[in-house]
Image (cartoon, helix red, strand yellow):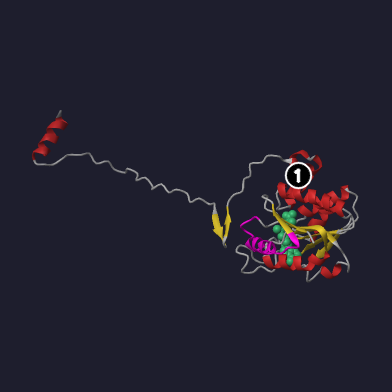
């Protein structure tokens, strides 16, 4: 009642009485998060790739699955790509049991273990060359938007030898920049069926393909680990350039691999 009388008094003079509340928190303006994908980087469109297919043989193959469990801390490569290497290795050995294998970019030995174990199970005796600097990536250039020299130096030849000692008996270690430092250790006349390129940058991939192409058997395969990843722009560019050549077929697997098959 008193409140109304006081209010009425102020209203007589055209004034309105209100209670002032102190310390009312001012709400922050709500910011919508920027969508991370899709994005265009160096002229290529990237989005998260989530196929709808659900056939998952990597879960049903006990030998592979146990092996992957053992080596997973020694690899940057996911189970999908490791399983693909496991299968390709078997197929290539069946095509030509004499054809040699090579991996450039071993890091801590994970993918070399997967393929070496498969060769062992098939009782193969062909050399499996393993090339790494053990001081990280080399030959990065302006073509590689995210990679710089010496990344992935957190490894050693001893660490790899330790992982691989029970996987295959015919590994050959090539310690240094490939091909210039170590390719002379590969005997003249060697023929290859399998080449896994996991070097992250354009110039190294280019030098490896130039070195191996004439040594690759028809039906032989080069797998590029890094093709489908926005962090490896140089590899995407390099493989796309190769698509123009008619002596090779290139398959883009949605797991991120590019698989190049020599068709003539
Ligand atoms: C991404 S890691 C390889 C990952 C490995 N395949 C795995 O199972 O996780 C890249 C490796 O390539 C090596 N590398 C890059 N360019 C090279 C070159 N031209 N010669 C030898 N090694 C190279 C680096 O030292 C590094 O260990």
Q: Where's the N terminus, which quadrant?
A: top left
Verify whether residue 244 appears in magenta: yes
Would you identify the image quadrant in which residue 150 lies? Answer: bottom right
SS under mark 1: helix
Q: Is residue 31 magenta?
A: no
Q: Can the viewer see residue 12? A: yes
Q: Which residue is mark 1?
A: 69
Q: Quadrant of residue 67?
A: top right
Q: Which residues are magenta?
A: 228-248
Image point (73%, 63%), residue name: 246
For residue 180, side relative to residue 21 (left or right): right
Crowd rating for badge 1 (residues with CA inside 10 Å; few <14, some 14–19, many 20+): few
Splitting the image into 4 quarters, where does residue 201 fall?
bottom right
Seen as rendered, the residue at the extreme top is: 1
Residue shown at 75% from the left, 41% from the top: 57
Q: Position of residue 140 (x, y in %)?
A: 66, 67
Residue name at image x 77 percent, y 51 percent: 85
Give ligand 1's quarter of the image.
Answer: bottom right
Give the percent coordinates (x, y) of residue 154.
71, 59
Rendered view: 229 above or below 20 = below
Counting from the top left corner in percent of width and height, residue 222 is at 76, 58
Ligand 1 lies under 8 Å from the Cβ of mark 1: no
Counting from the top left corner in percent of width and height, residue 113 is at 80, 52
Judge left or right: residue 52 versus residue 38: right
Q: For the C terminus, which image quadrant?
A: bottom right
Image point (81%, 52%), residue name: 89
């Amino acid at each position: 009642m008193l409140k109304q009388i006081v209010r009425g008094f102020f209203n007589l003079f055209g004034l309105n009485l209100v209670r002032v509340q102190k310390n009312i928190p001012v709400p922050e303006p709500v910011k919508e998060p920027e969508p991370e994908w899709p994005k265009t980087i160096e002229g290529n469109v990237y989005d998260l790739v989530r196929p709808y297919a659900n056939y998952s043989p990597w879960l049903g193959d006990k030998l592979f699955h146990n092996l992957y469990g053992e080596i997973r801390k020694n690899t940057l490569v996911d189970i999908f790509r490791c399983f693909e290497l496991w299968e390709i290795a078997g197929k290539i050995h069946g095509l030509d049991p004499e054809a040699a294998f090579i991996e450039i970019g071993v890091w801590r030995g994970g993918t070399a273990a997967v393929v070496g174990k498969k060769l062992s199970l098939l009782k193969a005796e062909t050399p499996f060359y393993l090339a790494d600097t053990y001081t990280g990536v080399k030959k990065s250039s302006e073509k590689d938007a995210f990679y710089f020299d010496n990344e992935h130096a957190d490894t050693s030849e001893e660490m790899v030898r330790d992982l691989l000692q029970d996987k295959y008996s015919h590994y050959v270690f090539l310690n240094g920049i490939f091909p210039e430092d170590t390719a002379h250790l590969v005997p003249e006349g060697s023929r290859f069926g399998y080449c896994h390129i996991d070097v992250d940058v354009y110039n190294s991939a280019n030098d490896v393909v130039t070195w191996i192409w004439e040594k690759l058997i028809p039906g032989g395969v080069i797998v590029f680990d890094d093709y489908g990843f926005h962090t490896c722009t140089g590899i995407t560019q390099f493989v796309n350039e190769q698509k123009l050549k008619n002596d090779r077929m290139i398959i883009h697997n949605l797991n991120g691999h590019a698989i190049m098959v020599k068709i003539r």
